[in-house]
Amino acid sequence: MNILYCGDSNIEQGVLMSALSLSKNCDEKLSIYILTASVLKHKAISDSFADTLKNTAKKLEKEIDVHIFDLSKEFESFLPKANMDTRFTPLCMLRLFADTVEELPDKLLYLDSDVMCRKNFKEFYNTDICDIEMLGVPDRYGKWFFGNIFKHDYLNSGVLLLNMKNIKKRGLFLKCRAMCAKKKMFMPDQSALNKLSVKGKVPRKYNEQGSIKGDTVFKHFTTFFRFLPYFHAVTIKPWEVEKLHNELKIHEFDYILDLVKEVYEIE
């Protein structure tokens, strides 16, 4: 199974946790592909992280392959200028450069670094996507404000099954890069992908953006809203241990946290 992550050095511990959760719940060998870059204040993920990931996975008695690609030159040559100062890190848009990396396979499961796996995801990964470019789950909040409100077809881009062959053939990522360079958007690459792609949707269990359910396969730690004692946004990531335990009451990833604590200082 082929997994794709994208970002700078700040996502390392998230990728480590996410990849370990995948490995724990997967019977097949994983190939992890990471796109990174050094741009402005952002520092690329070092090549040594590949060994960190592989060696930590061995503690779960799992073997994984890790491939890291530095796309600093490619990203700088086609900066998403209209969206460099949004609340989202511009390096999340690195996934829009995946079509420039020849070594990437035709089928990829893209994951944000704050996505944790709870169950075997083989059924989702093996979904037939021959006629589309990407497959995902509607965005928890965006589905009400973007796209078709009746179809709820505005996908959250944190978990996407990608058909790279169709993406390259139809020039999807190239079109998205151009759109992000010229048009300012609240969620740049997510909005571009939704507007321009040929897509399909699957049940929320494959990208649960709310409370974990019994059938949840992927839990995505996105920002959510609370109304009491006042309306406010809340963002809690899986490596924020105290908040994870005390506010979300989630303990099921502690076995991974213990492994990650051996590598990184986490809260």
Image (cartoon, rainbow, N blue to C red):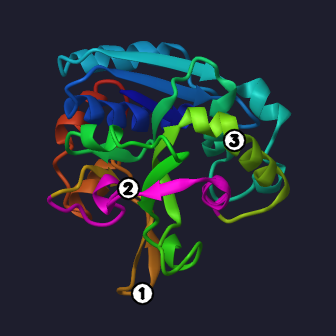
Position of residue 147 measured from the top left corner of the image (x, y, whole percent): 59, 72
State whether residue 27 appears in this view: yes
The quadrant the N terminus occupies is top left
Find the distance from the CA under tag 1 to the CA under tag 2. Answer: 21 Å
Q: Position of residue 88 (x, y in %)?
A: 62, 54
The residue that label 1 is drawn on is 230
What amino acid does circle 1 point to?
A: Tyr
Secondary element under disc 2, as helix, strand or loop, is loop
- Left or right: where 221 falls relative to 186: left
Observer-nearest residue: 261 or 5? 5
- Which region shows up in magenta? 187-214
Q: Residue beneath label 3, please? A: 170
Magenta stretch contains residue 260: no
**142 w.r.t. 222: above or below:** below
User: Any magenta on residue 189?
Assistant: yes
Q: Position of residue 64 (x, y in %)?
A: 33, 17
Which of disc 3 and disc 2 is earlier in sequence?
A: 3
Q: Is residue 122 left or right of residue 266?
A: left
Q: Position of residue 228 (x, y in %)?
A: 35, 86
Q: Residues within 10 Å of mark 3 (few under 14, many from 20)?
A: some
Disc 3 marks a residue whose amino acid type is Arg
Q: Is residue 261 visible?
A: no
Lower sequence index among marks 1 and 3: 3
Distance in Å between CA atoms under marks 2 and 3: 32 Å
Q: Nearer the viewer, mark 1 or mark 3?
A: 3
Name the residue at 17% across, 17% down.
Answer: 61
Residue at numbered disc 2: 221
